[in-house]
Amino acid sequence: MTFRNGLASLLRPEDSVLVLIDHQPYQLANLNSHEPQMVINNTAGLAKAARAFGVPTILTTVIAERGGLLFPQITDVFPGQEIIDRTLINTWEDPKVVDVVKATGRKQLIIAGLWTEVCVAMPAIQALGEGWDVTVVTDACGGVSVESHEVAIKRMIAAGANMMTWIAVAAEWQRDWARLDTAGKLTEVFAQHGGGSGIAYLWEQQLLNTPVPTAAG
């Protein structure tokens, strides 16, 4: 097995392409591996981070007429962008999706979707077999049970996939806070979707902007 290590193995925004798969009401209705609102929050944070870094993001659904439209928390990040609707369960068997990904010229393929054990595992394993560098964002995914999610992750790791959470992906894209063209944008995403860390940042800003009390004269 080839280990993923060294500086070159870290994610680079200029070499990344994100595919968000089937974040739809039908899948969410039987999401039991995570708290559903957390998955919505994390996926929105991931989408906004991708926008901040200029990472091409492909949006895809499966039979949206029956399964429901992509979450508005995602589509609002990319207003007017075409959503590729499929009949194929395995996204990577659909040439419409694959052709768009290949057209970006990027080889670091980042995937998140519902459900982990089906619509994430299938394309991840196929793409790995075709030589792609695949990262799965585990907390922007979810399965019908904790077991199904965890077994799918183990299966993808065995196939060679890289596992990360959305904040780790965003931090790896940033890499250096001296990159001021994206630092402010990323900080805003963290403030909106980073939970306690985001609130702590806002509190810090409040304290820095609070005048120091002076003794009464």
Image (cartoon, grey):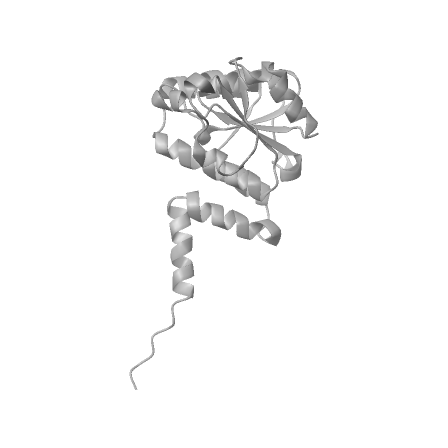
Q: Residue at x 42, y 17 (%)?
A: 66
Q: Is residue 215 above or below residue 156?
A: below
Q: Quadrant of the N terminus?
A: top right
Q: Quadrant of residue 126?
A: top right
Residue 168 seen in this snapshot: no
Residue 6 seen in this snapshot: yes
Q: Nearer the viewer, residue 71 or 128?
A: 71
> Residue 101 appears at what percent x and percent y?
64, 26
Q: Residue at x 41, y 48 (%)?
A: 197
Q: Quadrant of the C terminus?
A: bottom left
Q: Is residue 76 left or right of residue 148?
A: right
Q: Residue at x 41, y 55 (%)?
A: 202
Q: Is residue 89 above or below residue 209?
A: above
Q: Nearer the viewer, residue 69 or 50?
A: 69
Q: Give the residue at the far left of this rendering.
A: 216
Q: How many marks?
A: 0
Q: Nearer the viewer, residue 53 or 99?
A: 99
Q: Nearer the viewer, residue 205 or 147?
A: 205
